Image (cartoon, helix red, strand yellow):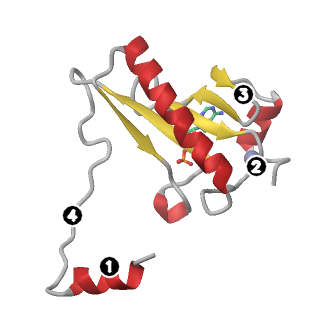
């Protein structure tokens, strides 16, 4: 998979990227088709298809890095909020099957407010309690 994976190619430097951060575990690049100015992607250096495959230690480190970058980018971009988005599977909107975490700055002026909205569904009576019981970990 790594051979043809576009993010592996970016990690290997075979295709260019606008990199804003790099360490032993991650490379952070600007998204080529941003949802907003400054939209960035945290990529793992190793190829993991998605969150299901990501080792626990890297999952923790990715969130620590996301928090750090959210603060740093908010200061630099003067944005008014931030969304973190992480898609797993085609049905969930994943198009590149190499783990990445979207960092999306949000702006009060000129923002696309519908960027991450969805239609809400409702539960029937008792459904939510049964679901919570079934899902309790
Ligand atoms: P997802 O839909 O969650 O898999 O997100 C994939 C993201 O990768 C999209 O937002 C694309 O715009 C972005 N993307 C694809 N190719 C590149 C590239 N060569 N450099 C930067 N971002 C890219
Ligand atoms: Zn890859």
Q: Are marks 4 and 2 in contact (CB under 8 Å)?
A: no
Q: Residue at x 85, y 47 (%)?
A: 3
Distance between the Cα atoms at labels 1 and 4? 18 Å
In the image: residue 121, left or right of residue 116: left
Which image quadrant for residue 52? bottom right
Q: Residue furthest left?
A: 125
**C-alpha gap between disc 4 and disc 2:** 34 Å
Instruction: For ligand 2, tell me if the residue under mark 2 lies within 8 Å.
Output: yes
Find out whether the residues at labels 4 and 3 contact each other: C-beta distance under 8 Å: no
x and y percentages locating residue 37 in the rendered image: 41, 22
Residue 120 - label: 4
Label 3 neighbour load within 10 Å: few <14, some 14-19, many 20+:
few
Q: Which residue is mark 1?
A: 132
Rendered-image quadrant of the N terminus = bottom right
What distance separates the C-alpha of mark 4 from that of mark 3? 39 Å
**Helix, strand or loop at disc 4?**
loop
As displayed, is residue 58 above or below residue 106?
Answer: below
Mark drawn on residue 47: 2
Query: How many numbered markers are drawn?
Result: 4
Q: Which mark is residue 23?
A: 3
Residue 134 position, x and y percent, is 38, 85
């Amino acid at each position: 998979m790594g051979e043809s994976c576009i993010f592996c190619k970016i990690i290997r430097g075979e295709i260019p990227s606008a990199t804003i951060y790099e360490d032993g575990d991650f490379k952070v690049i600007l998204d080529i088709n941003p949802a907003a100015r400054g939209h960035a992607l945290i990529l793992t250096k190793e190829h993991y298809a998605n969150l299901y495959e990501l080792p626990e230690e890297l999952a923790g480190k990715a969130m620590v890095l996301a928090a750090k970058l959210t603060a740093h980018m908010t200061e630099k971009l003067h944005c008014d909020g931030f969304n973190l988005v992480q898609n797993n599977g085609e049905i969930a909107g994943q198009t590149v099957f190499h783990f990445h975490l979207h960092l999306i700055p949000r702006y009060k002026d000129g923002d696309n407010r519908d960027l991450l909205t969805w239609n809400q569904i409702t539960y029937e009576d008792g459904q939510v309690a049964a679901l919570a019981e079934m899902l309790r970990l």
